[in-house]
């Protein structure tokens, strides 16, 4: 065969598509770009449709103009701030905008950074708490070898990673009774002089509920009056940090509380960017120890930088800035209000089906969750999740955290692009499967499964 003869053959008669796909070693010879594209494109068809993935909080839709900006900046490395000074400027604009949104007393001079996601942002927030606590203990001549961090059992896994990676004792406050969020009084009671801080979650990944940051701050105020312990708060606003300012503007959870020293959020969740960007902002510059800050050349001067990751794409930061100025506060408010409207109405429709007890109805985050009223039907929520996949729906089923592992729930995250029409299609599919279960009296329910949530 002539060297380029394969290029004129019909696509699915080409040599590389007739044999086995390379899997374990790099092939000796390459293939035409379009052949490689079709090979990979066809394999990815078996993936789920991201728009039907109702488990993830991550954004799955952006405007064409954002796509264009991202494609124009795929080659830029965010860490090279001296080489891409204007991209670095856009990053700092985003930080200042978030600082203002979260009511920092000095939004123009405080410090913050983009990250690869909220998990890295949480790591940085935890490190800042540890450094601040260690410095205080050393100044008092006390040992600084047994730090602890107070969280609820409903926190995201990144906080477990932080505690393990940086040798911090995790003090987890379990959920009791009907609780879906951590009790502020019991969180404060878990603190001692070795507590580096308390993490408060603005939007639980389990049910979407906000924890009460104001009540936690008040409980820690009382603890300080009683014991002298001054315990800071880090707010994990991975989802809520981009929702509460627009849907619940009167809710006091942010830097209006002096005890809140740092806040993180995910730009790729309700910040409406594709996966790959998070943010953390400190209340004021002095709330971040200078040991954690490095300086790079920037427009002939020095620019502070802090991160755990080094090389990372700039395109998501550019996309975040696009969203902030394209949408404005009114645009974010309109999008999140639309999501909440869909969530609240869908929750009411699901409740009306009969078998379900609602645990969350979309009034904090646009997230709804439910469990079964009858603890022993002939089917389970795991079975319903499995059957909903027949039309591509990915609806997670999982257990609540300690000490409520006996509760099995199902959850839907309503994101930008999940419309009333799609919600109606999902509801019809749920009805269809409930009807099917009713015709199967001998069906054996799945009592446990590979539940998933994000």
Image: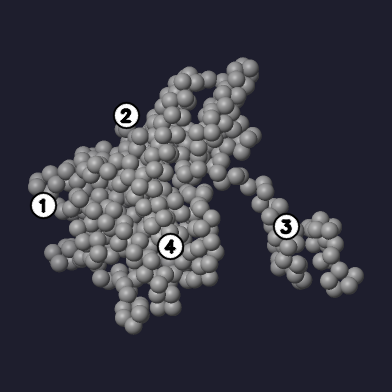
Snapshot colouring: one colour
Q: Pointers 3 and 1 in contact (CB under 8 A)?
A: no
Mark 1 to mark 4 CA distance (whole Å): 41 Å
User: Where 82 sits versus 199, above or below?
Assistant: below
Q: Is residue 357 left or right of residue 291?
A: right
**Residues tagged 3 and 2 counted as in contact (Cβ below 8 A):** no
Q: Mark 1 touching mark 2, by CB under 8 A?
A: no
For marks 2 and 4, give the one nearer the viewer: 4
- Residue lying at the far bottom of the rendered structure: 300
Helix, strand or loop at mark 2 = loop
Q: CA distance from mark 4 to mark 3?
A: 30 Å
Mark 4, residue position: 317
Q: Can the viewer see residue 421?
A: yes
Q: CA distance from mark 2 to mark 4?
A: 42 Å
At 70% across and 60% down in the image, what residue appears? 37
Give the number of the disc on residue 228. Answer: 1
In primary-sequence order, the first of circles 1 and 2 is: 2
Q: CA distance from mark 1 to mark 2?
A: 31 Å
- Mark 2, residue position: 177
The mark found on residue 38 in the picture is 3
CB of mark 2 within 8 Å of CB of mark 4?
A: no
Q: Is residue 419 above or below residue 107?
A: above
Among numbered discs 4 and 3, the one appearing first in the sequence: 3
At which x and y percent is residue 450?
54, 39
The tag earlier along the polypeptide, 3 or 2, is 3
* In front: label 3 or label 2: 3
């Amino acid at each position: 065969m002539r060297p380029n003869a394969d290029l004129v053959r019909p696509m699915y008669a080409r040599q590389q598509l007739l044999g086995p796909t390379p899997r374990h070693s790099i092939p000796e010879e390459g293939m035409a770009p379009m052949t490689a594209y079709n090979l990979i494109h066809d394999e990815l068809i078996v993936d789920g449709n991201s728009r039907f993935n109702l488990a993830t909080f991550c954004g799955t839709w952006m405007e064409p103009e954002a796509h264009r900006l991202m494609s124009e900046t795929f080659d830029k490395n965010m860490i090279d701030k001296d080489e891409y000074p204007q991209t670095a400027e856009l990053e700092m604009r985003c930080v200042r905008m978030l600082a203002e949104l979260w009511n920092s007393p000095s939004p123009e001079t405080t410090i913050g950074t983009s990250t690869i996601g909220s998990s890295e942002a949480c790591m940085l927030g935890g490190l800042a708490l540890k450094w601040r606590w260690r410095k205080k203990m050393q100044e008092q001549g006390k040992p600084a070898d047994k730090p602890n961090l107070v969280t609820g059992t409903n926190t995201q896994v990144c906080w477990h990673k932080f505690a393990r990676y940086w040798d911090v004792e995790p003090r987890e406050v379990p959920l009791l009774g009907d609780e879906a969020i951590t009790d502020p009084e019991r969180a404060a009671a878990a603190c001692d002089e070795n507590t580096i801080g308390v993490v408060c979650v603005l939007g639980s990944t389990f049910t979407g509920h906000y924890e009460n940051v104001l009540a936690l701050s008040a409980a820690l105020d009382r603890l300080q009056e009683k014991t002298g312990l001054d315990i800071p708060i880090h707010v994990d606003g991975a989802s809520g940090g981009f929702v509460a300012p627009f849907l619940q503007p009167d809710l006091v959870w942010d830097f209006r509380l002096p005890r809140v020293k740092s806040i993180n959020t995910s730009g790729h969740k309700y910040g409406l960017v594709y996966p790959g960007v998070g943010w953390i902002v400190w209340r004021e510059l002095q709330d971040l120890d200078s040991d954690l800050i490095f300086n790079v050349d920037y427009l002939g001067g020095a620019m502070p930088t802090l991160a755990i990751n080094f090389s990372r794409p700039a395109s998501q930061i550019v996309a975040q800035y696009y969203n902030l100025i394209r949408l404005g506060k009114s645009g974010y408010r309109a999008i999140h209000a639309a999501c909440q409207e869909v969530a609240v109405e869908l929750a009411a429709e699901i409740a009306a089906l009969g078998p379900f007890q609602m645990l969350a109805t979309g009034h904090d985050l646009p997230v709804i969750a439910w469990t079964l009223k009858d603890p022993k039907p002939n089917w389970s929520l795991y079975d319903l999740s499995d059957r909903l996949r027949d039309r591509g729906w990915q609806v997670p089923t999982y257990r609540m955290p300690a000490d409520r592992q006996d509760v099995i729930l199902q959850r839907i995250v309503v994101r930008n692009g999940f419309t009333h029409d799609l919600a109606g299609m999902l509801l019809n599919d749920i009805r269809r499967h409930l009807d099917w279960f009713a015709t199967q009296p001998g069906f054996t329910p799945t009592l446990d499964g590979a539940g998933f949530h994000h």
